[in-house]
Amino acid sequence: MEGYILDYDVLSLETDSYYSIPGFTRKDRSAGSGYATPYYIEGEFADDHTFTGIIRVPLDEDLHLSDELDVLPDQFTYYLEISDIYGELLQYEKEQLLLPAGAPESDYITVICDADGKPLDSQGSNAELYSTYRRNTDTVSVYVCDYGKYMNELKGDVKKIADGALFGTEVHFQ
């Protein structure tokens, strides 16, 4: 949590849910049966160990999947079992150690190379997503390069990329 700014976040969930009404019991709602379960919680970290938030449950979606039930009864119990919580912090302190002061971020490109020194293919359009399919990514090298220089001088040559990058580091995954 070092560097975290208390603000709004979303954590992802792995859940299972069911009701105390016929057709929606735990037995009737087995995994993979097509029923939606909550997959995120919205909120914020109150401190290093406490996340306060809300889970929205779209009950109307269950009604459309059932032939037996048109309207939920006035009273029922909804059971939600959370088996995993994970996610990334969306708010953090932005650090810029890398680009010249006032330089637009769009003038630079991030290049990530696998453990064999081959650049990973970017799969993103609005965000940087890299394909790791059939690649050794136990260790990757990350480089930040001037976009013009990369396109005209460095592209395709990992040695030139490493030498011409504004920033480079190795990341080891376990």
Image (tube, rainbow, N blue to C red):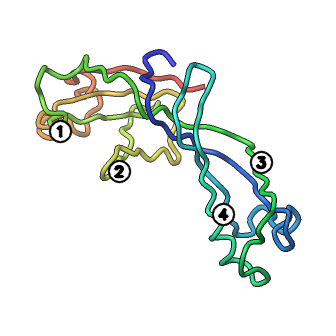
Q: Secondary structure at mark 1?
A: helix
Q: Position of residue 44 (x, y in %)?
A: 52, 32
Please report whichever mark, 4 or 3, sits nearer to the chain's N-terminal start. Answer: 4
Q: Position of residue 116 (x, y in %)?
A: 45, 32
Q: Position of residue 77 (x, y in %)?
A: 81, 58
Circle 3 Cα neighbour tier, 10 Å, few/some/many (<14 / 14–19 / ≥20) = few
| Alpha carbons under labels 1 and 3: distance apart | 43 Å
Mark 2 or 4: the one toward you: 4
Specify the amino acid type for callout 1: Ser
Q: Position of residue 98 (x, y in %)?
A: 23, 20
Please report whichever mark, 1 or 2, sits nearer to the chain's N-terminal start. Answer: 1
Please report whichever mark, 2 or 4, sits nearer to the chain's N-terminal start. Answer: 4
Residue at 38%, 33% (x, y): give it.
113
Circle 2 Cα neighbour tier, 10 Å, few/some/many (<14 / 14–19 / ≥20) = few
Residue furthest out toward the bottom = 67
Residue wearing tag 3: 81
- Judged left or right of residue 11, residue 156 is left
Specify the amino acid type for callout 4: Ala
Residue wearing tag 4: 36
Frontmost residue, 123 versus 5:
5
Residue wearing tag 1: 106
Please report whichever mark, 4 or 1, sits nearer to the chain's N-terminal start. Answer: 4
* Residue 124 numbered tag: 2
31 w.r.t. 51: above or below: below
Q: Secondary structure at mark 4?
A: loop
Q: Which image quadrant is residue 33 in?
A: bottom right
Q: Secondary structure at mark 3?
A: strand
Residue at 81%, 68% (x, y): give it.
24
